[in-house]
Amino acid sequence: MASHGDNANVFVRDEGRAKWHDESLWLIRTKRDSVARTVPEWEELRTAAAAIKEYTVANLPDLLERFETNARQRGAVVHWAADAAAHNRIVASILEARGVSRVVKSKSMLTEECGLNPYLECRGVEVVDTDLGERIVQLRNEPPSHIVMPAIHLRRQEVGELFARELGTEPGLTDPTRLTEAARRHLRDKFLGAEAGITGVNFAIAESGGIVVCTNEGNADLGTSLPPVHIACMGIEKLVPRLSDLAVFTRLLARSATGQPITAYTSHMNGPRDGAELHIVIVDNGRSELLAKKDYRQALGCIRCGACLNTCPVYRRSGGYSYESVIPGPIGSVLGAARDPARHQSLPYACTMCGSCTDVCPVKIDLHAQLFGLRRDLVSSGAMTSGKRSASRVVSWVLQNPRAYEALGSAARFISLRLPWLARFALPAWFASRDLPEMPKRSFRQQMEDLGGE
Amino acid sequence: MASDRDTILQSLRDSQAAASGDLPQVRIRPEVYADPVAHFSIAVESVGGRCLRGSREERVALIGQVIESTAARQVRWEQLPGDTGGTLGAVESPQSLAGVDLLVAGGRFAVAENGAVWVDDGCLTERAGLFLAQHLVLVVRLEDVVNDMHQAYERLQSADFGYGVFISGPSKTADIEQALVIGAHGPRSLTVVLES
């Protein structure tokens, strides 16, 4: 498996795209900031959201049982899946028993995590992702590169070429409005012809047994209000205890995600439609193991708004695919590395420790501190690469020895001022995309002494 | 062999010392707008919708304007606030609403904070209509504008619905290069009529 750094190298080769990616996401971050500022009680909301999620995680088994009872009472069929394989089997068997071969799906990172689409396709089921961004990446045979904006890594020309090939739009068409119109027509036929709809779940309410799905496009609603079967797939952590808790989360979610005051559609489903079926598949797939890790269980509070991705200087400049994890960005690094440290060992280092993710997280997950903890775990488990380990030892020794620090400082100043070529020669990788700052002739300490300070 | 259900619940119970803590009490200072109705109409416009105001008597004329401006031919009326008498007859299938140009439906209440209107299946024949129609008009009584989402969920606490949705503006997407496009899969326009 390639490291985050190696993958990022590929992404930044296209400078225009990398710059555009960085700037578009930063723009969303600034929208989030301005809309959050219009809510004077923003910090109170974050504190409340964190407390509700902490309670939920601490009481998860009881809440899950209560949810199950209430959802059944409302006429839903509740299924449990310990892992991805069980999840896929359950969904496939529901479809098979009803002879379903055409399915429309709205966005769900969980089904992505479980690899549901290829599983169903192998069994002859057509699965159409209906979120526009997801449809685009599906037609390109790619995974989403962002959890809220799946096709953020693509430019309009690429979408135009794709649609010309797959949907028969006129070649050279790049106007987003007309491309969206073409997708609308294409997908409307799919909605009207679907025999089942699959959705994710944004929130599941223990006290009512209801589920809530949020979209801007209305695709989840079309996908569940037309066909006779709705399958909703949810991770065990999607619960909230009470209906009133949704006031807190609906106020935070879209503002944090895109800077909207609320998503265009926040749909509440209590049981199935008249004459239709609702199946709810509750999935663990490693979440209970994460919950057992005291230091990282907080990450289960994530509501998948994507704010930490949009603000992260590393994500913005390296793109979602560099993470090789279903969920990219800071939260994805935590979830991936906490679950499988050996596989994702470069992810805790795909971080500058700036803490911006922690500042914007609507449920106050201590993301940068968790990434720091994951680095510590890697070191103590001996999984760290030998190069990094020896470099850390050297740095640690230098920082503990004032004389060594002083000597190294003057050596660095000497080299940068007199022999910059030597530095370039010794550290070519570091210099590939960086340059040395202009160094002062004397150290800070020396300058203080010159001024007569202590 | 243990079922997946038992396996999951058992491993959750094993992984924690004990279920802990009381339910957190959420005490957020409520938004109190000097003029919630004015705030609501600004919020609706900001999410790409329109807000009209008028009396019950002006309803047909106001909605007539929308029918005209959208050039809607097939218009469907659901049960609106204050309407008495039977609901519309059932439709053959939700798919049969695919040709509706404009749907007029009733909202139970509206939220000043974010321009959302709550609509539920208590006054809808088929919820699919809300999303299949090319254009949507939602009629809400003026006195049913609440300040924020906390008040909104307070109202829903005692409500009985199988399906309900907060609708804030028309259907939209920005999935191609972050360019905002109104009319993704659902209605291309949303007009909220606040009725006194």
Image (spheres, coloured by chain):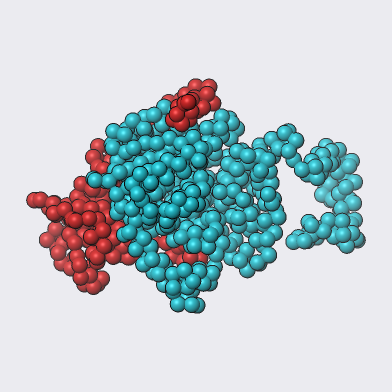
Q: In which quarter of the image is residue A212?
A: top left
- Indicate the position of residue A187 as horizontal and vertical percent values: 38, 62
Q: In which quarter of the image is residue A366?
A: top right
Q: Which residue is drawn at 49% across and 34% down?
A: A82
Q: Which of B151 and B79 is in front in this view?
A: B79
Question: Would residue B2 be visible to someone looking at this image?
Answer: yes
Q: Nearer the viewer, residue A228 or B59?
A: A228
Horizontally, residue A8 falls left or right of residue A408, namely left
The cyan one among the chains is A
Q: Residue at x 19, y 65 (%)?
A: B75
- Indicate the position of residue B188 as horizontal and vertical percent values: 32, 65
B47, above or below A349, in the image: below
Determine the colour of chain B. Answer: red
A411, above or below B185, in the image: above
Farthest residue, direction top: B18
Q: Residue at x 74, y 40 (%)?
A: A384
- Indicate the position of residue A150 as horizontal and vertical percent values: 51, 57
Question: Would residue B65 be visible to someone looking at this image?
Answer: no
Q: Which residue is drawn at 66% across and 43% down?
A: A343
Number of callouts: 0
- Indicate the position of residue A224 as horizontal and vertical percent values: 33, 51
Q: Which of B186 and A252 is in front in this view?
A: B186
Work out which quarter of the rendered image holds the C terminus of chain A and state it.
top right
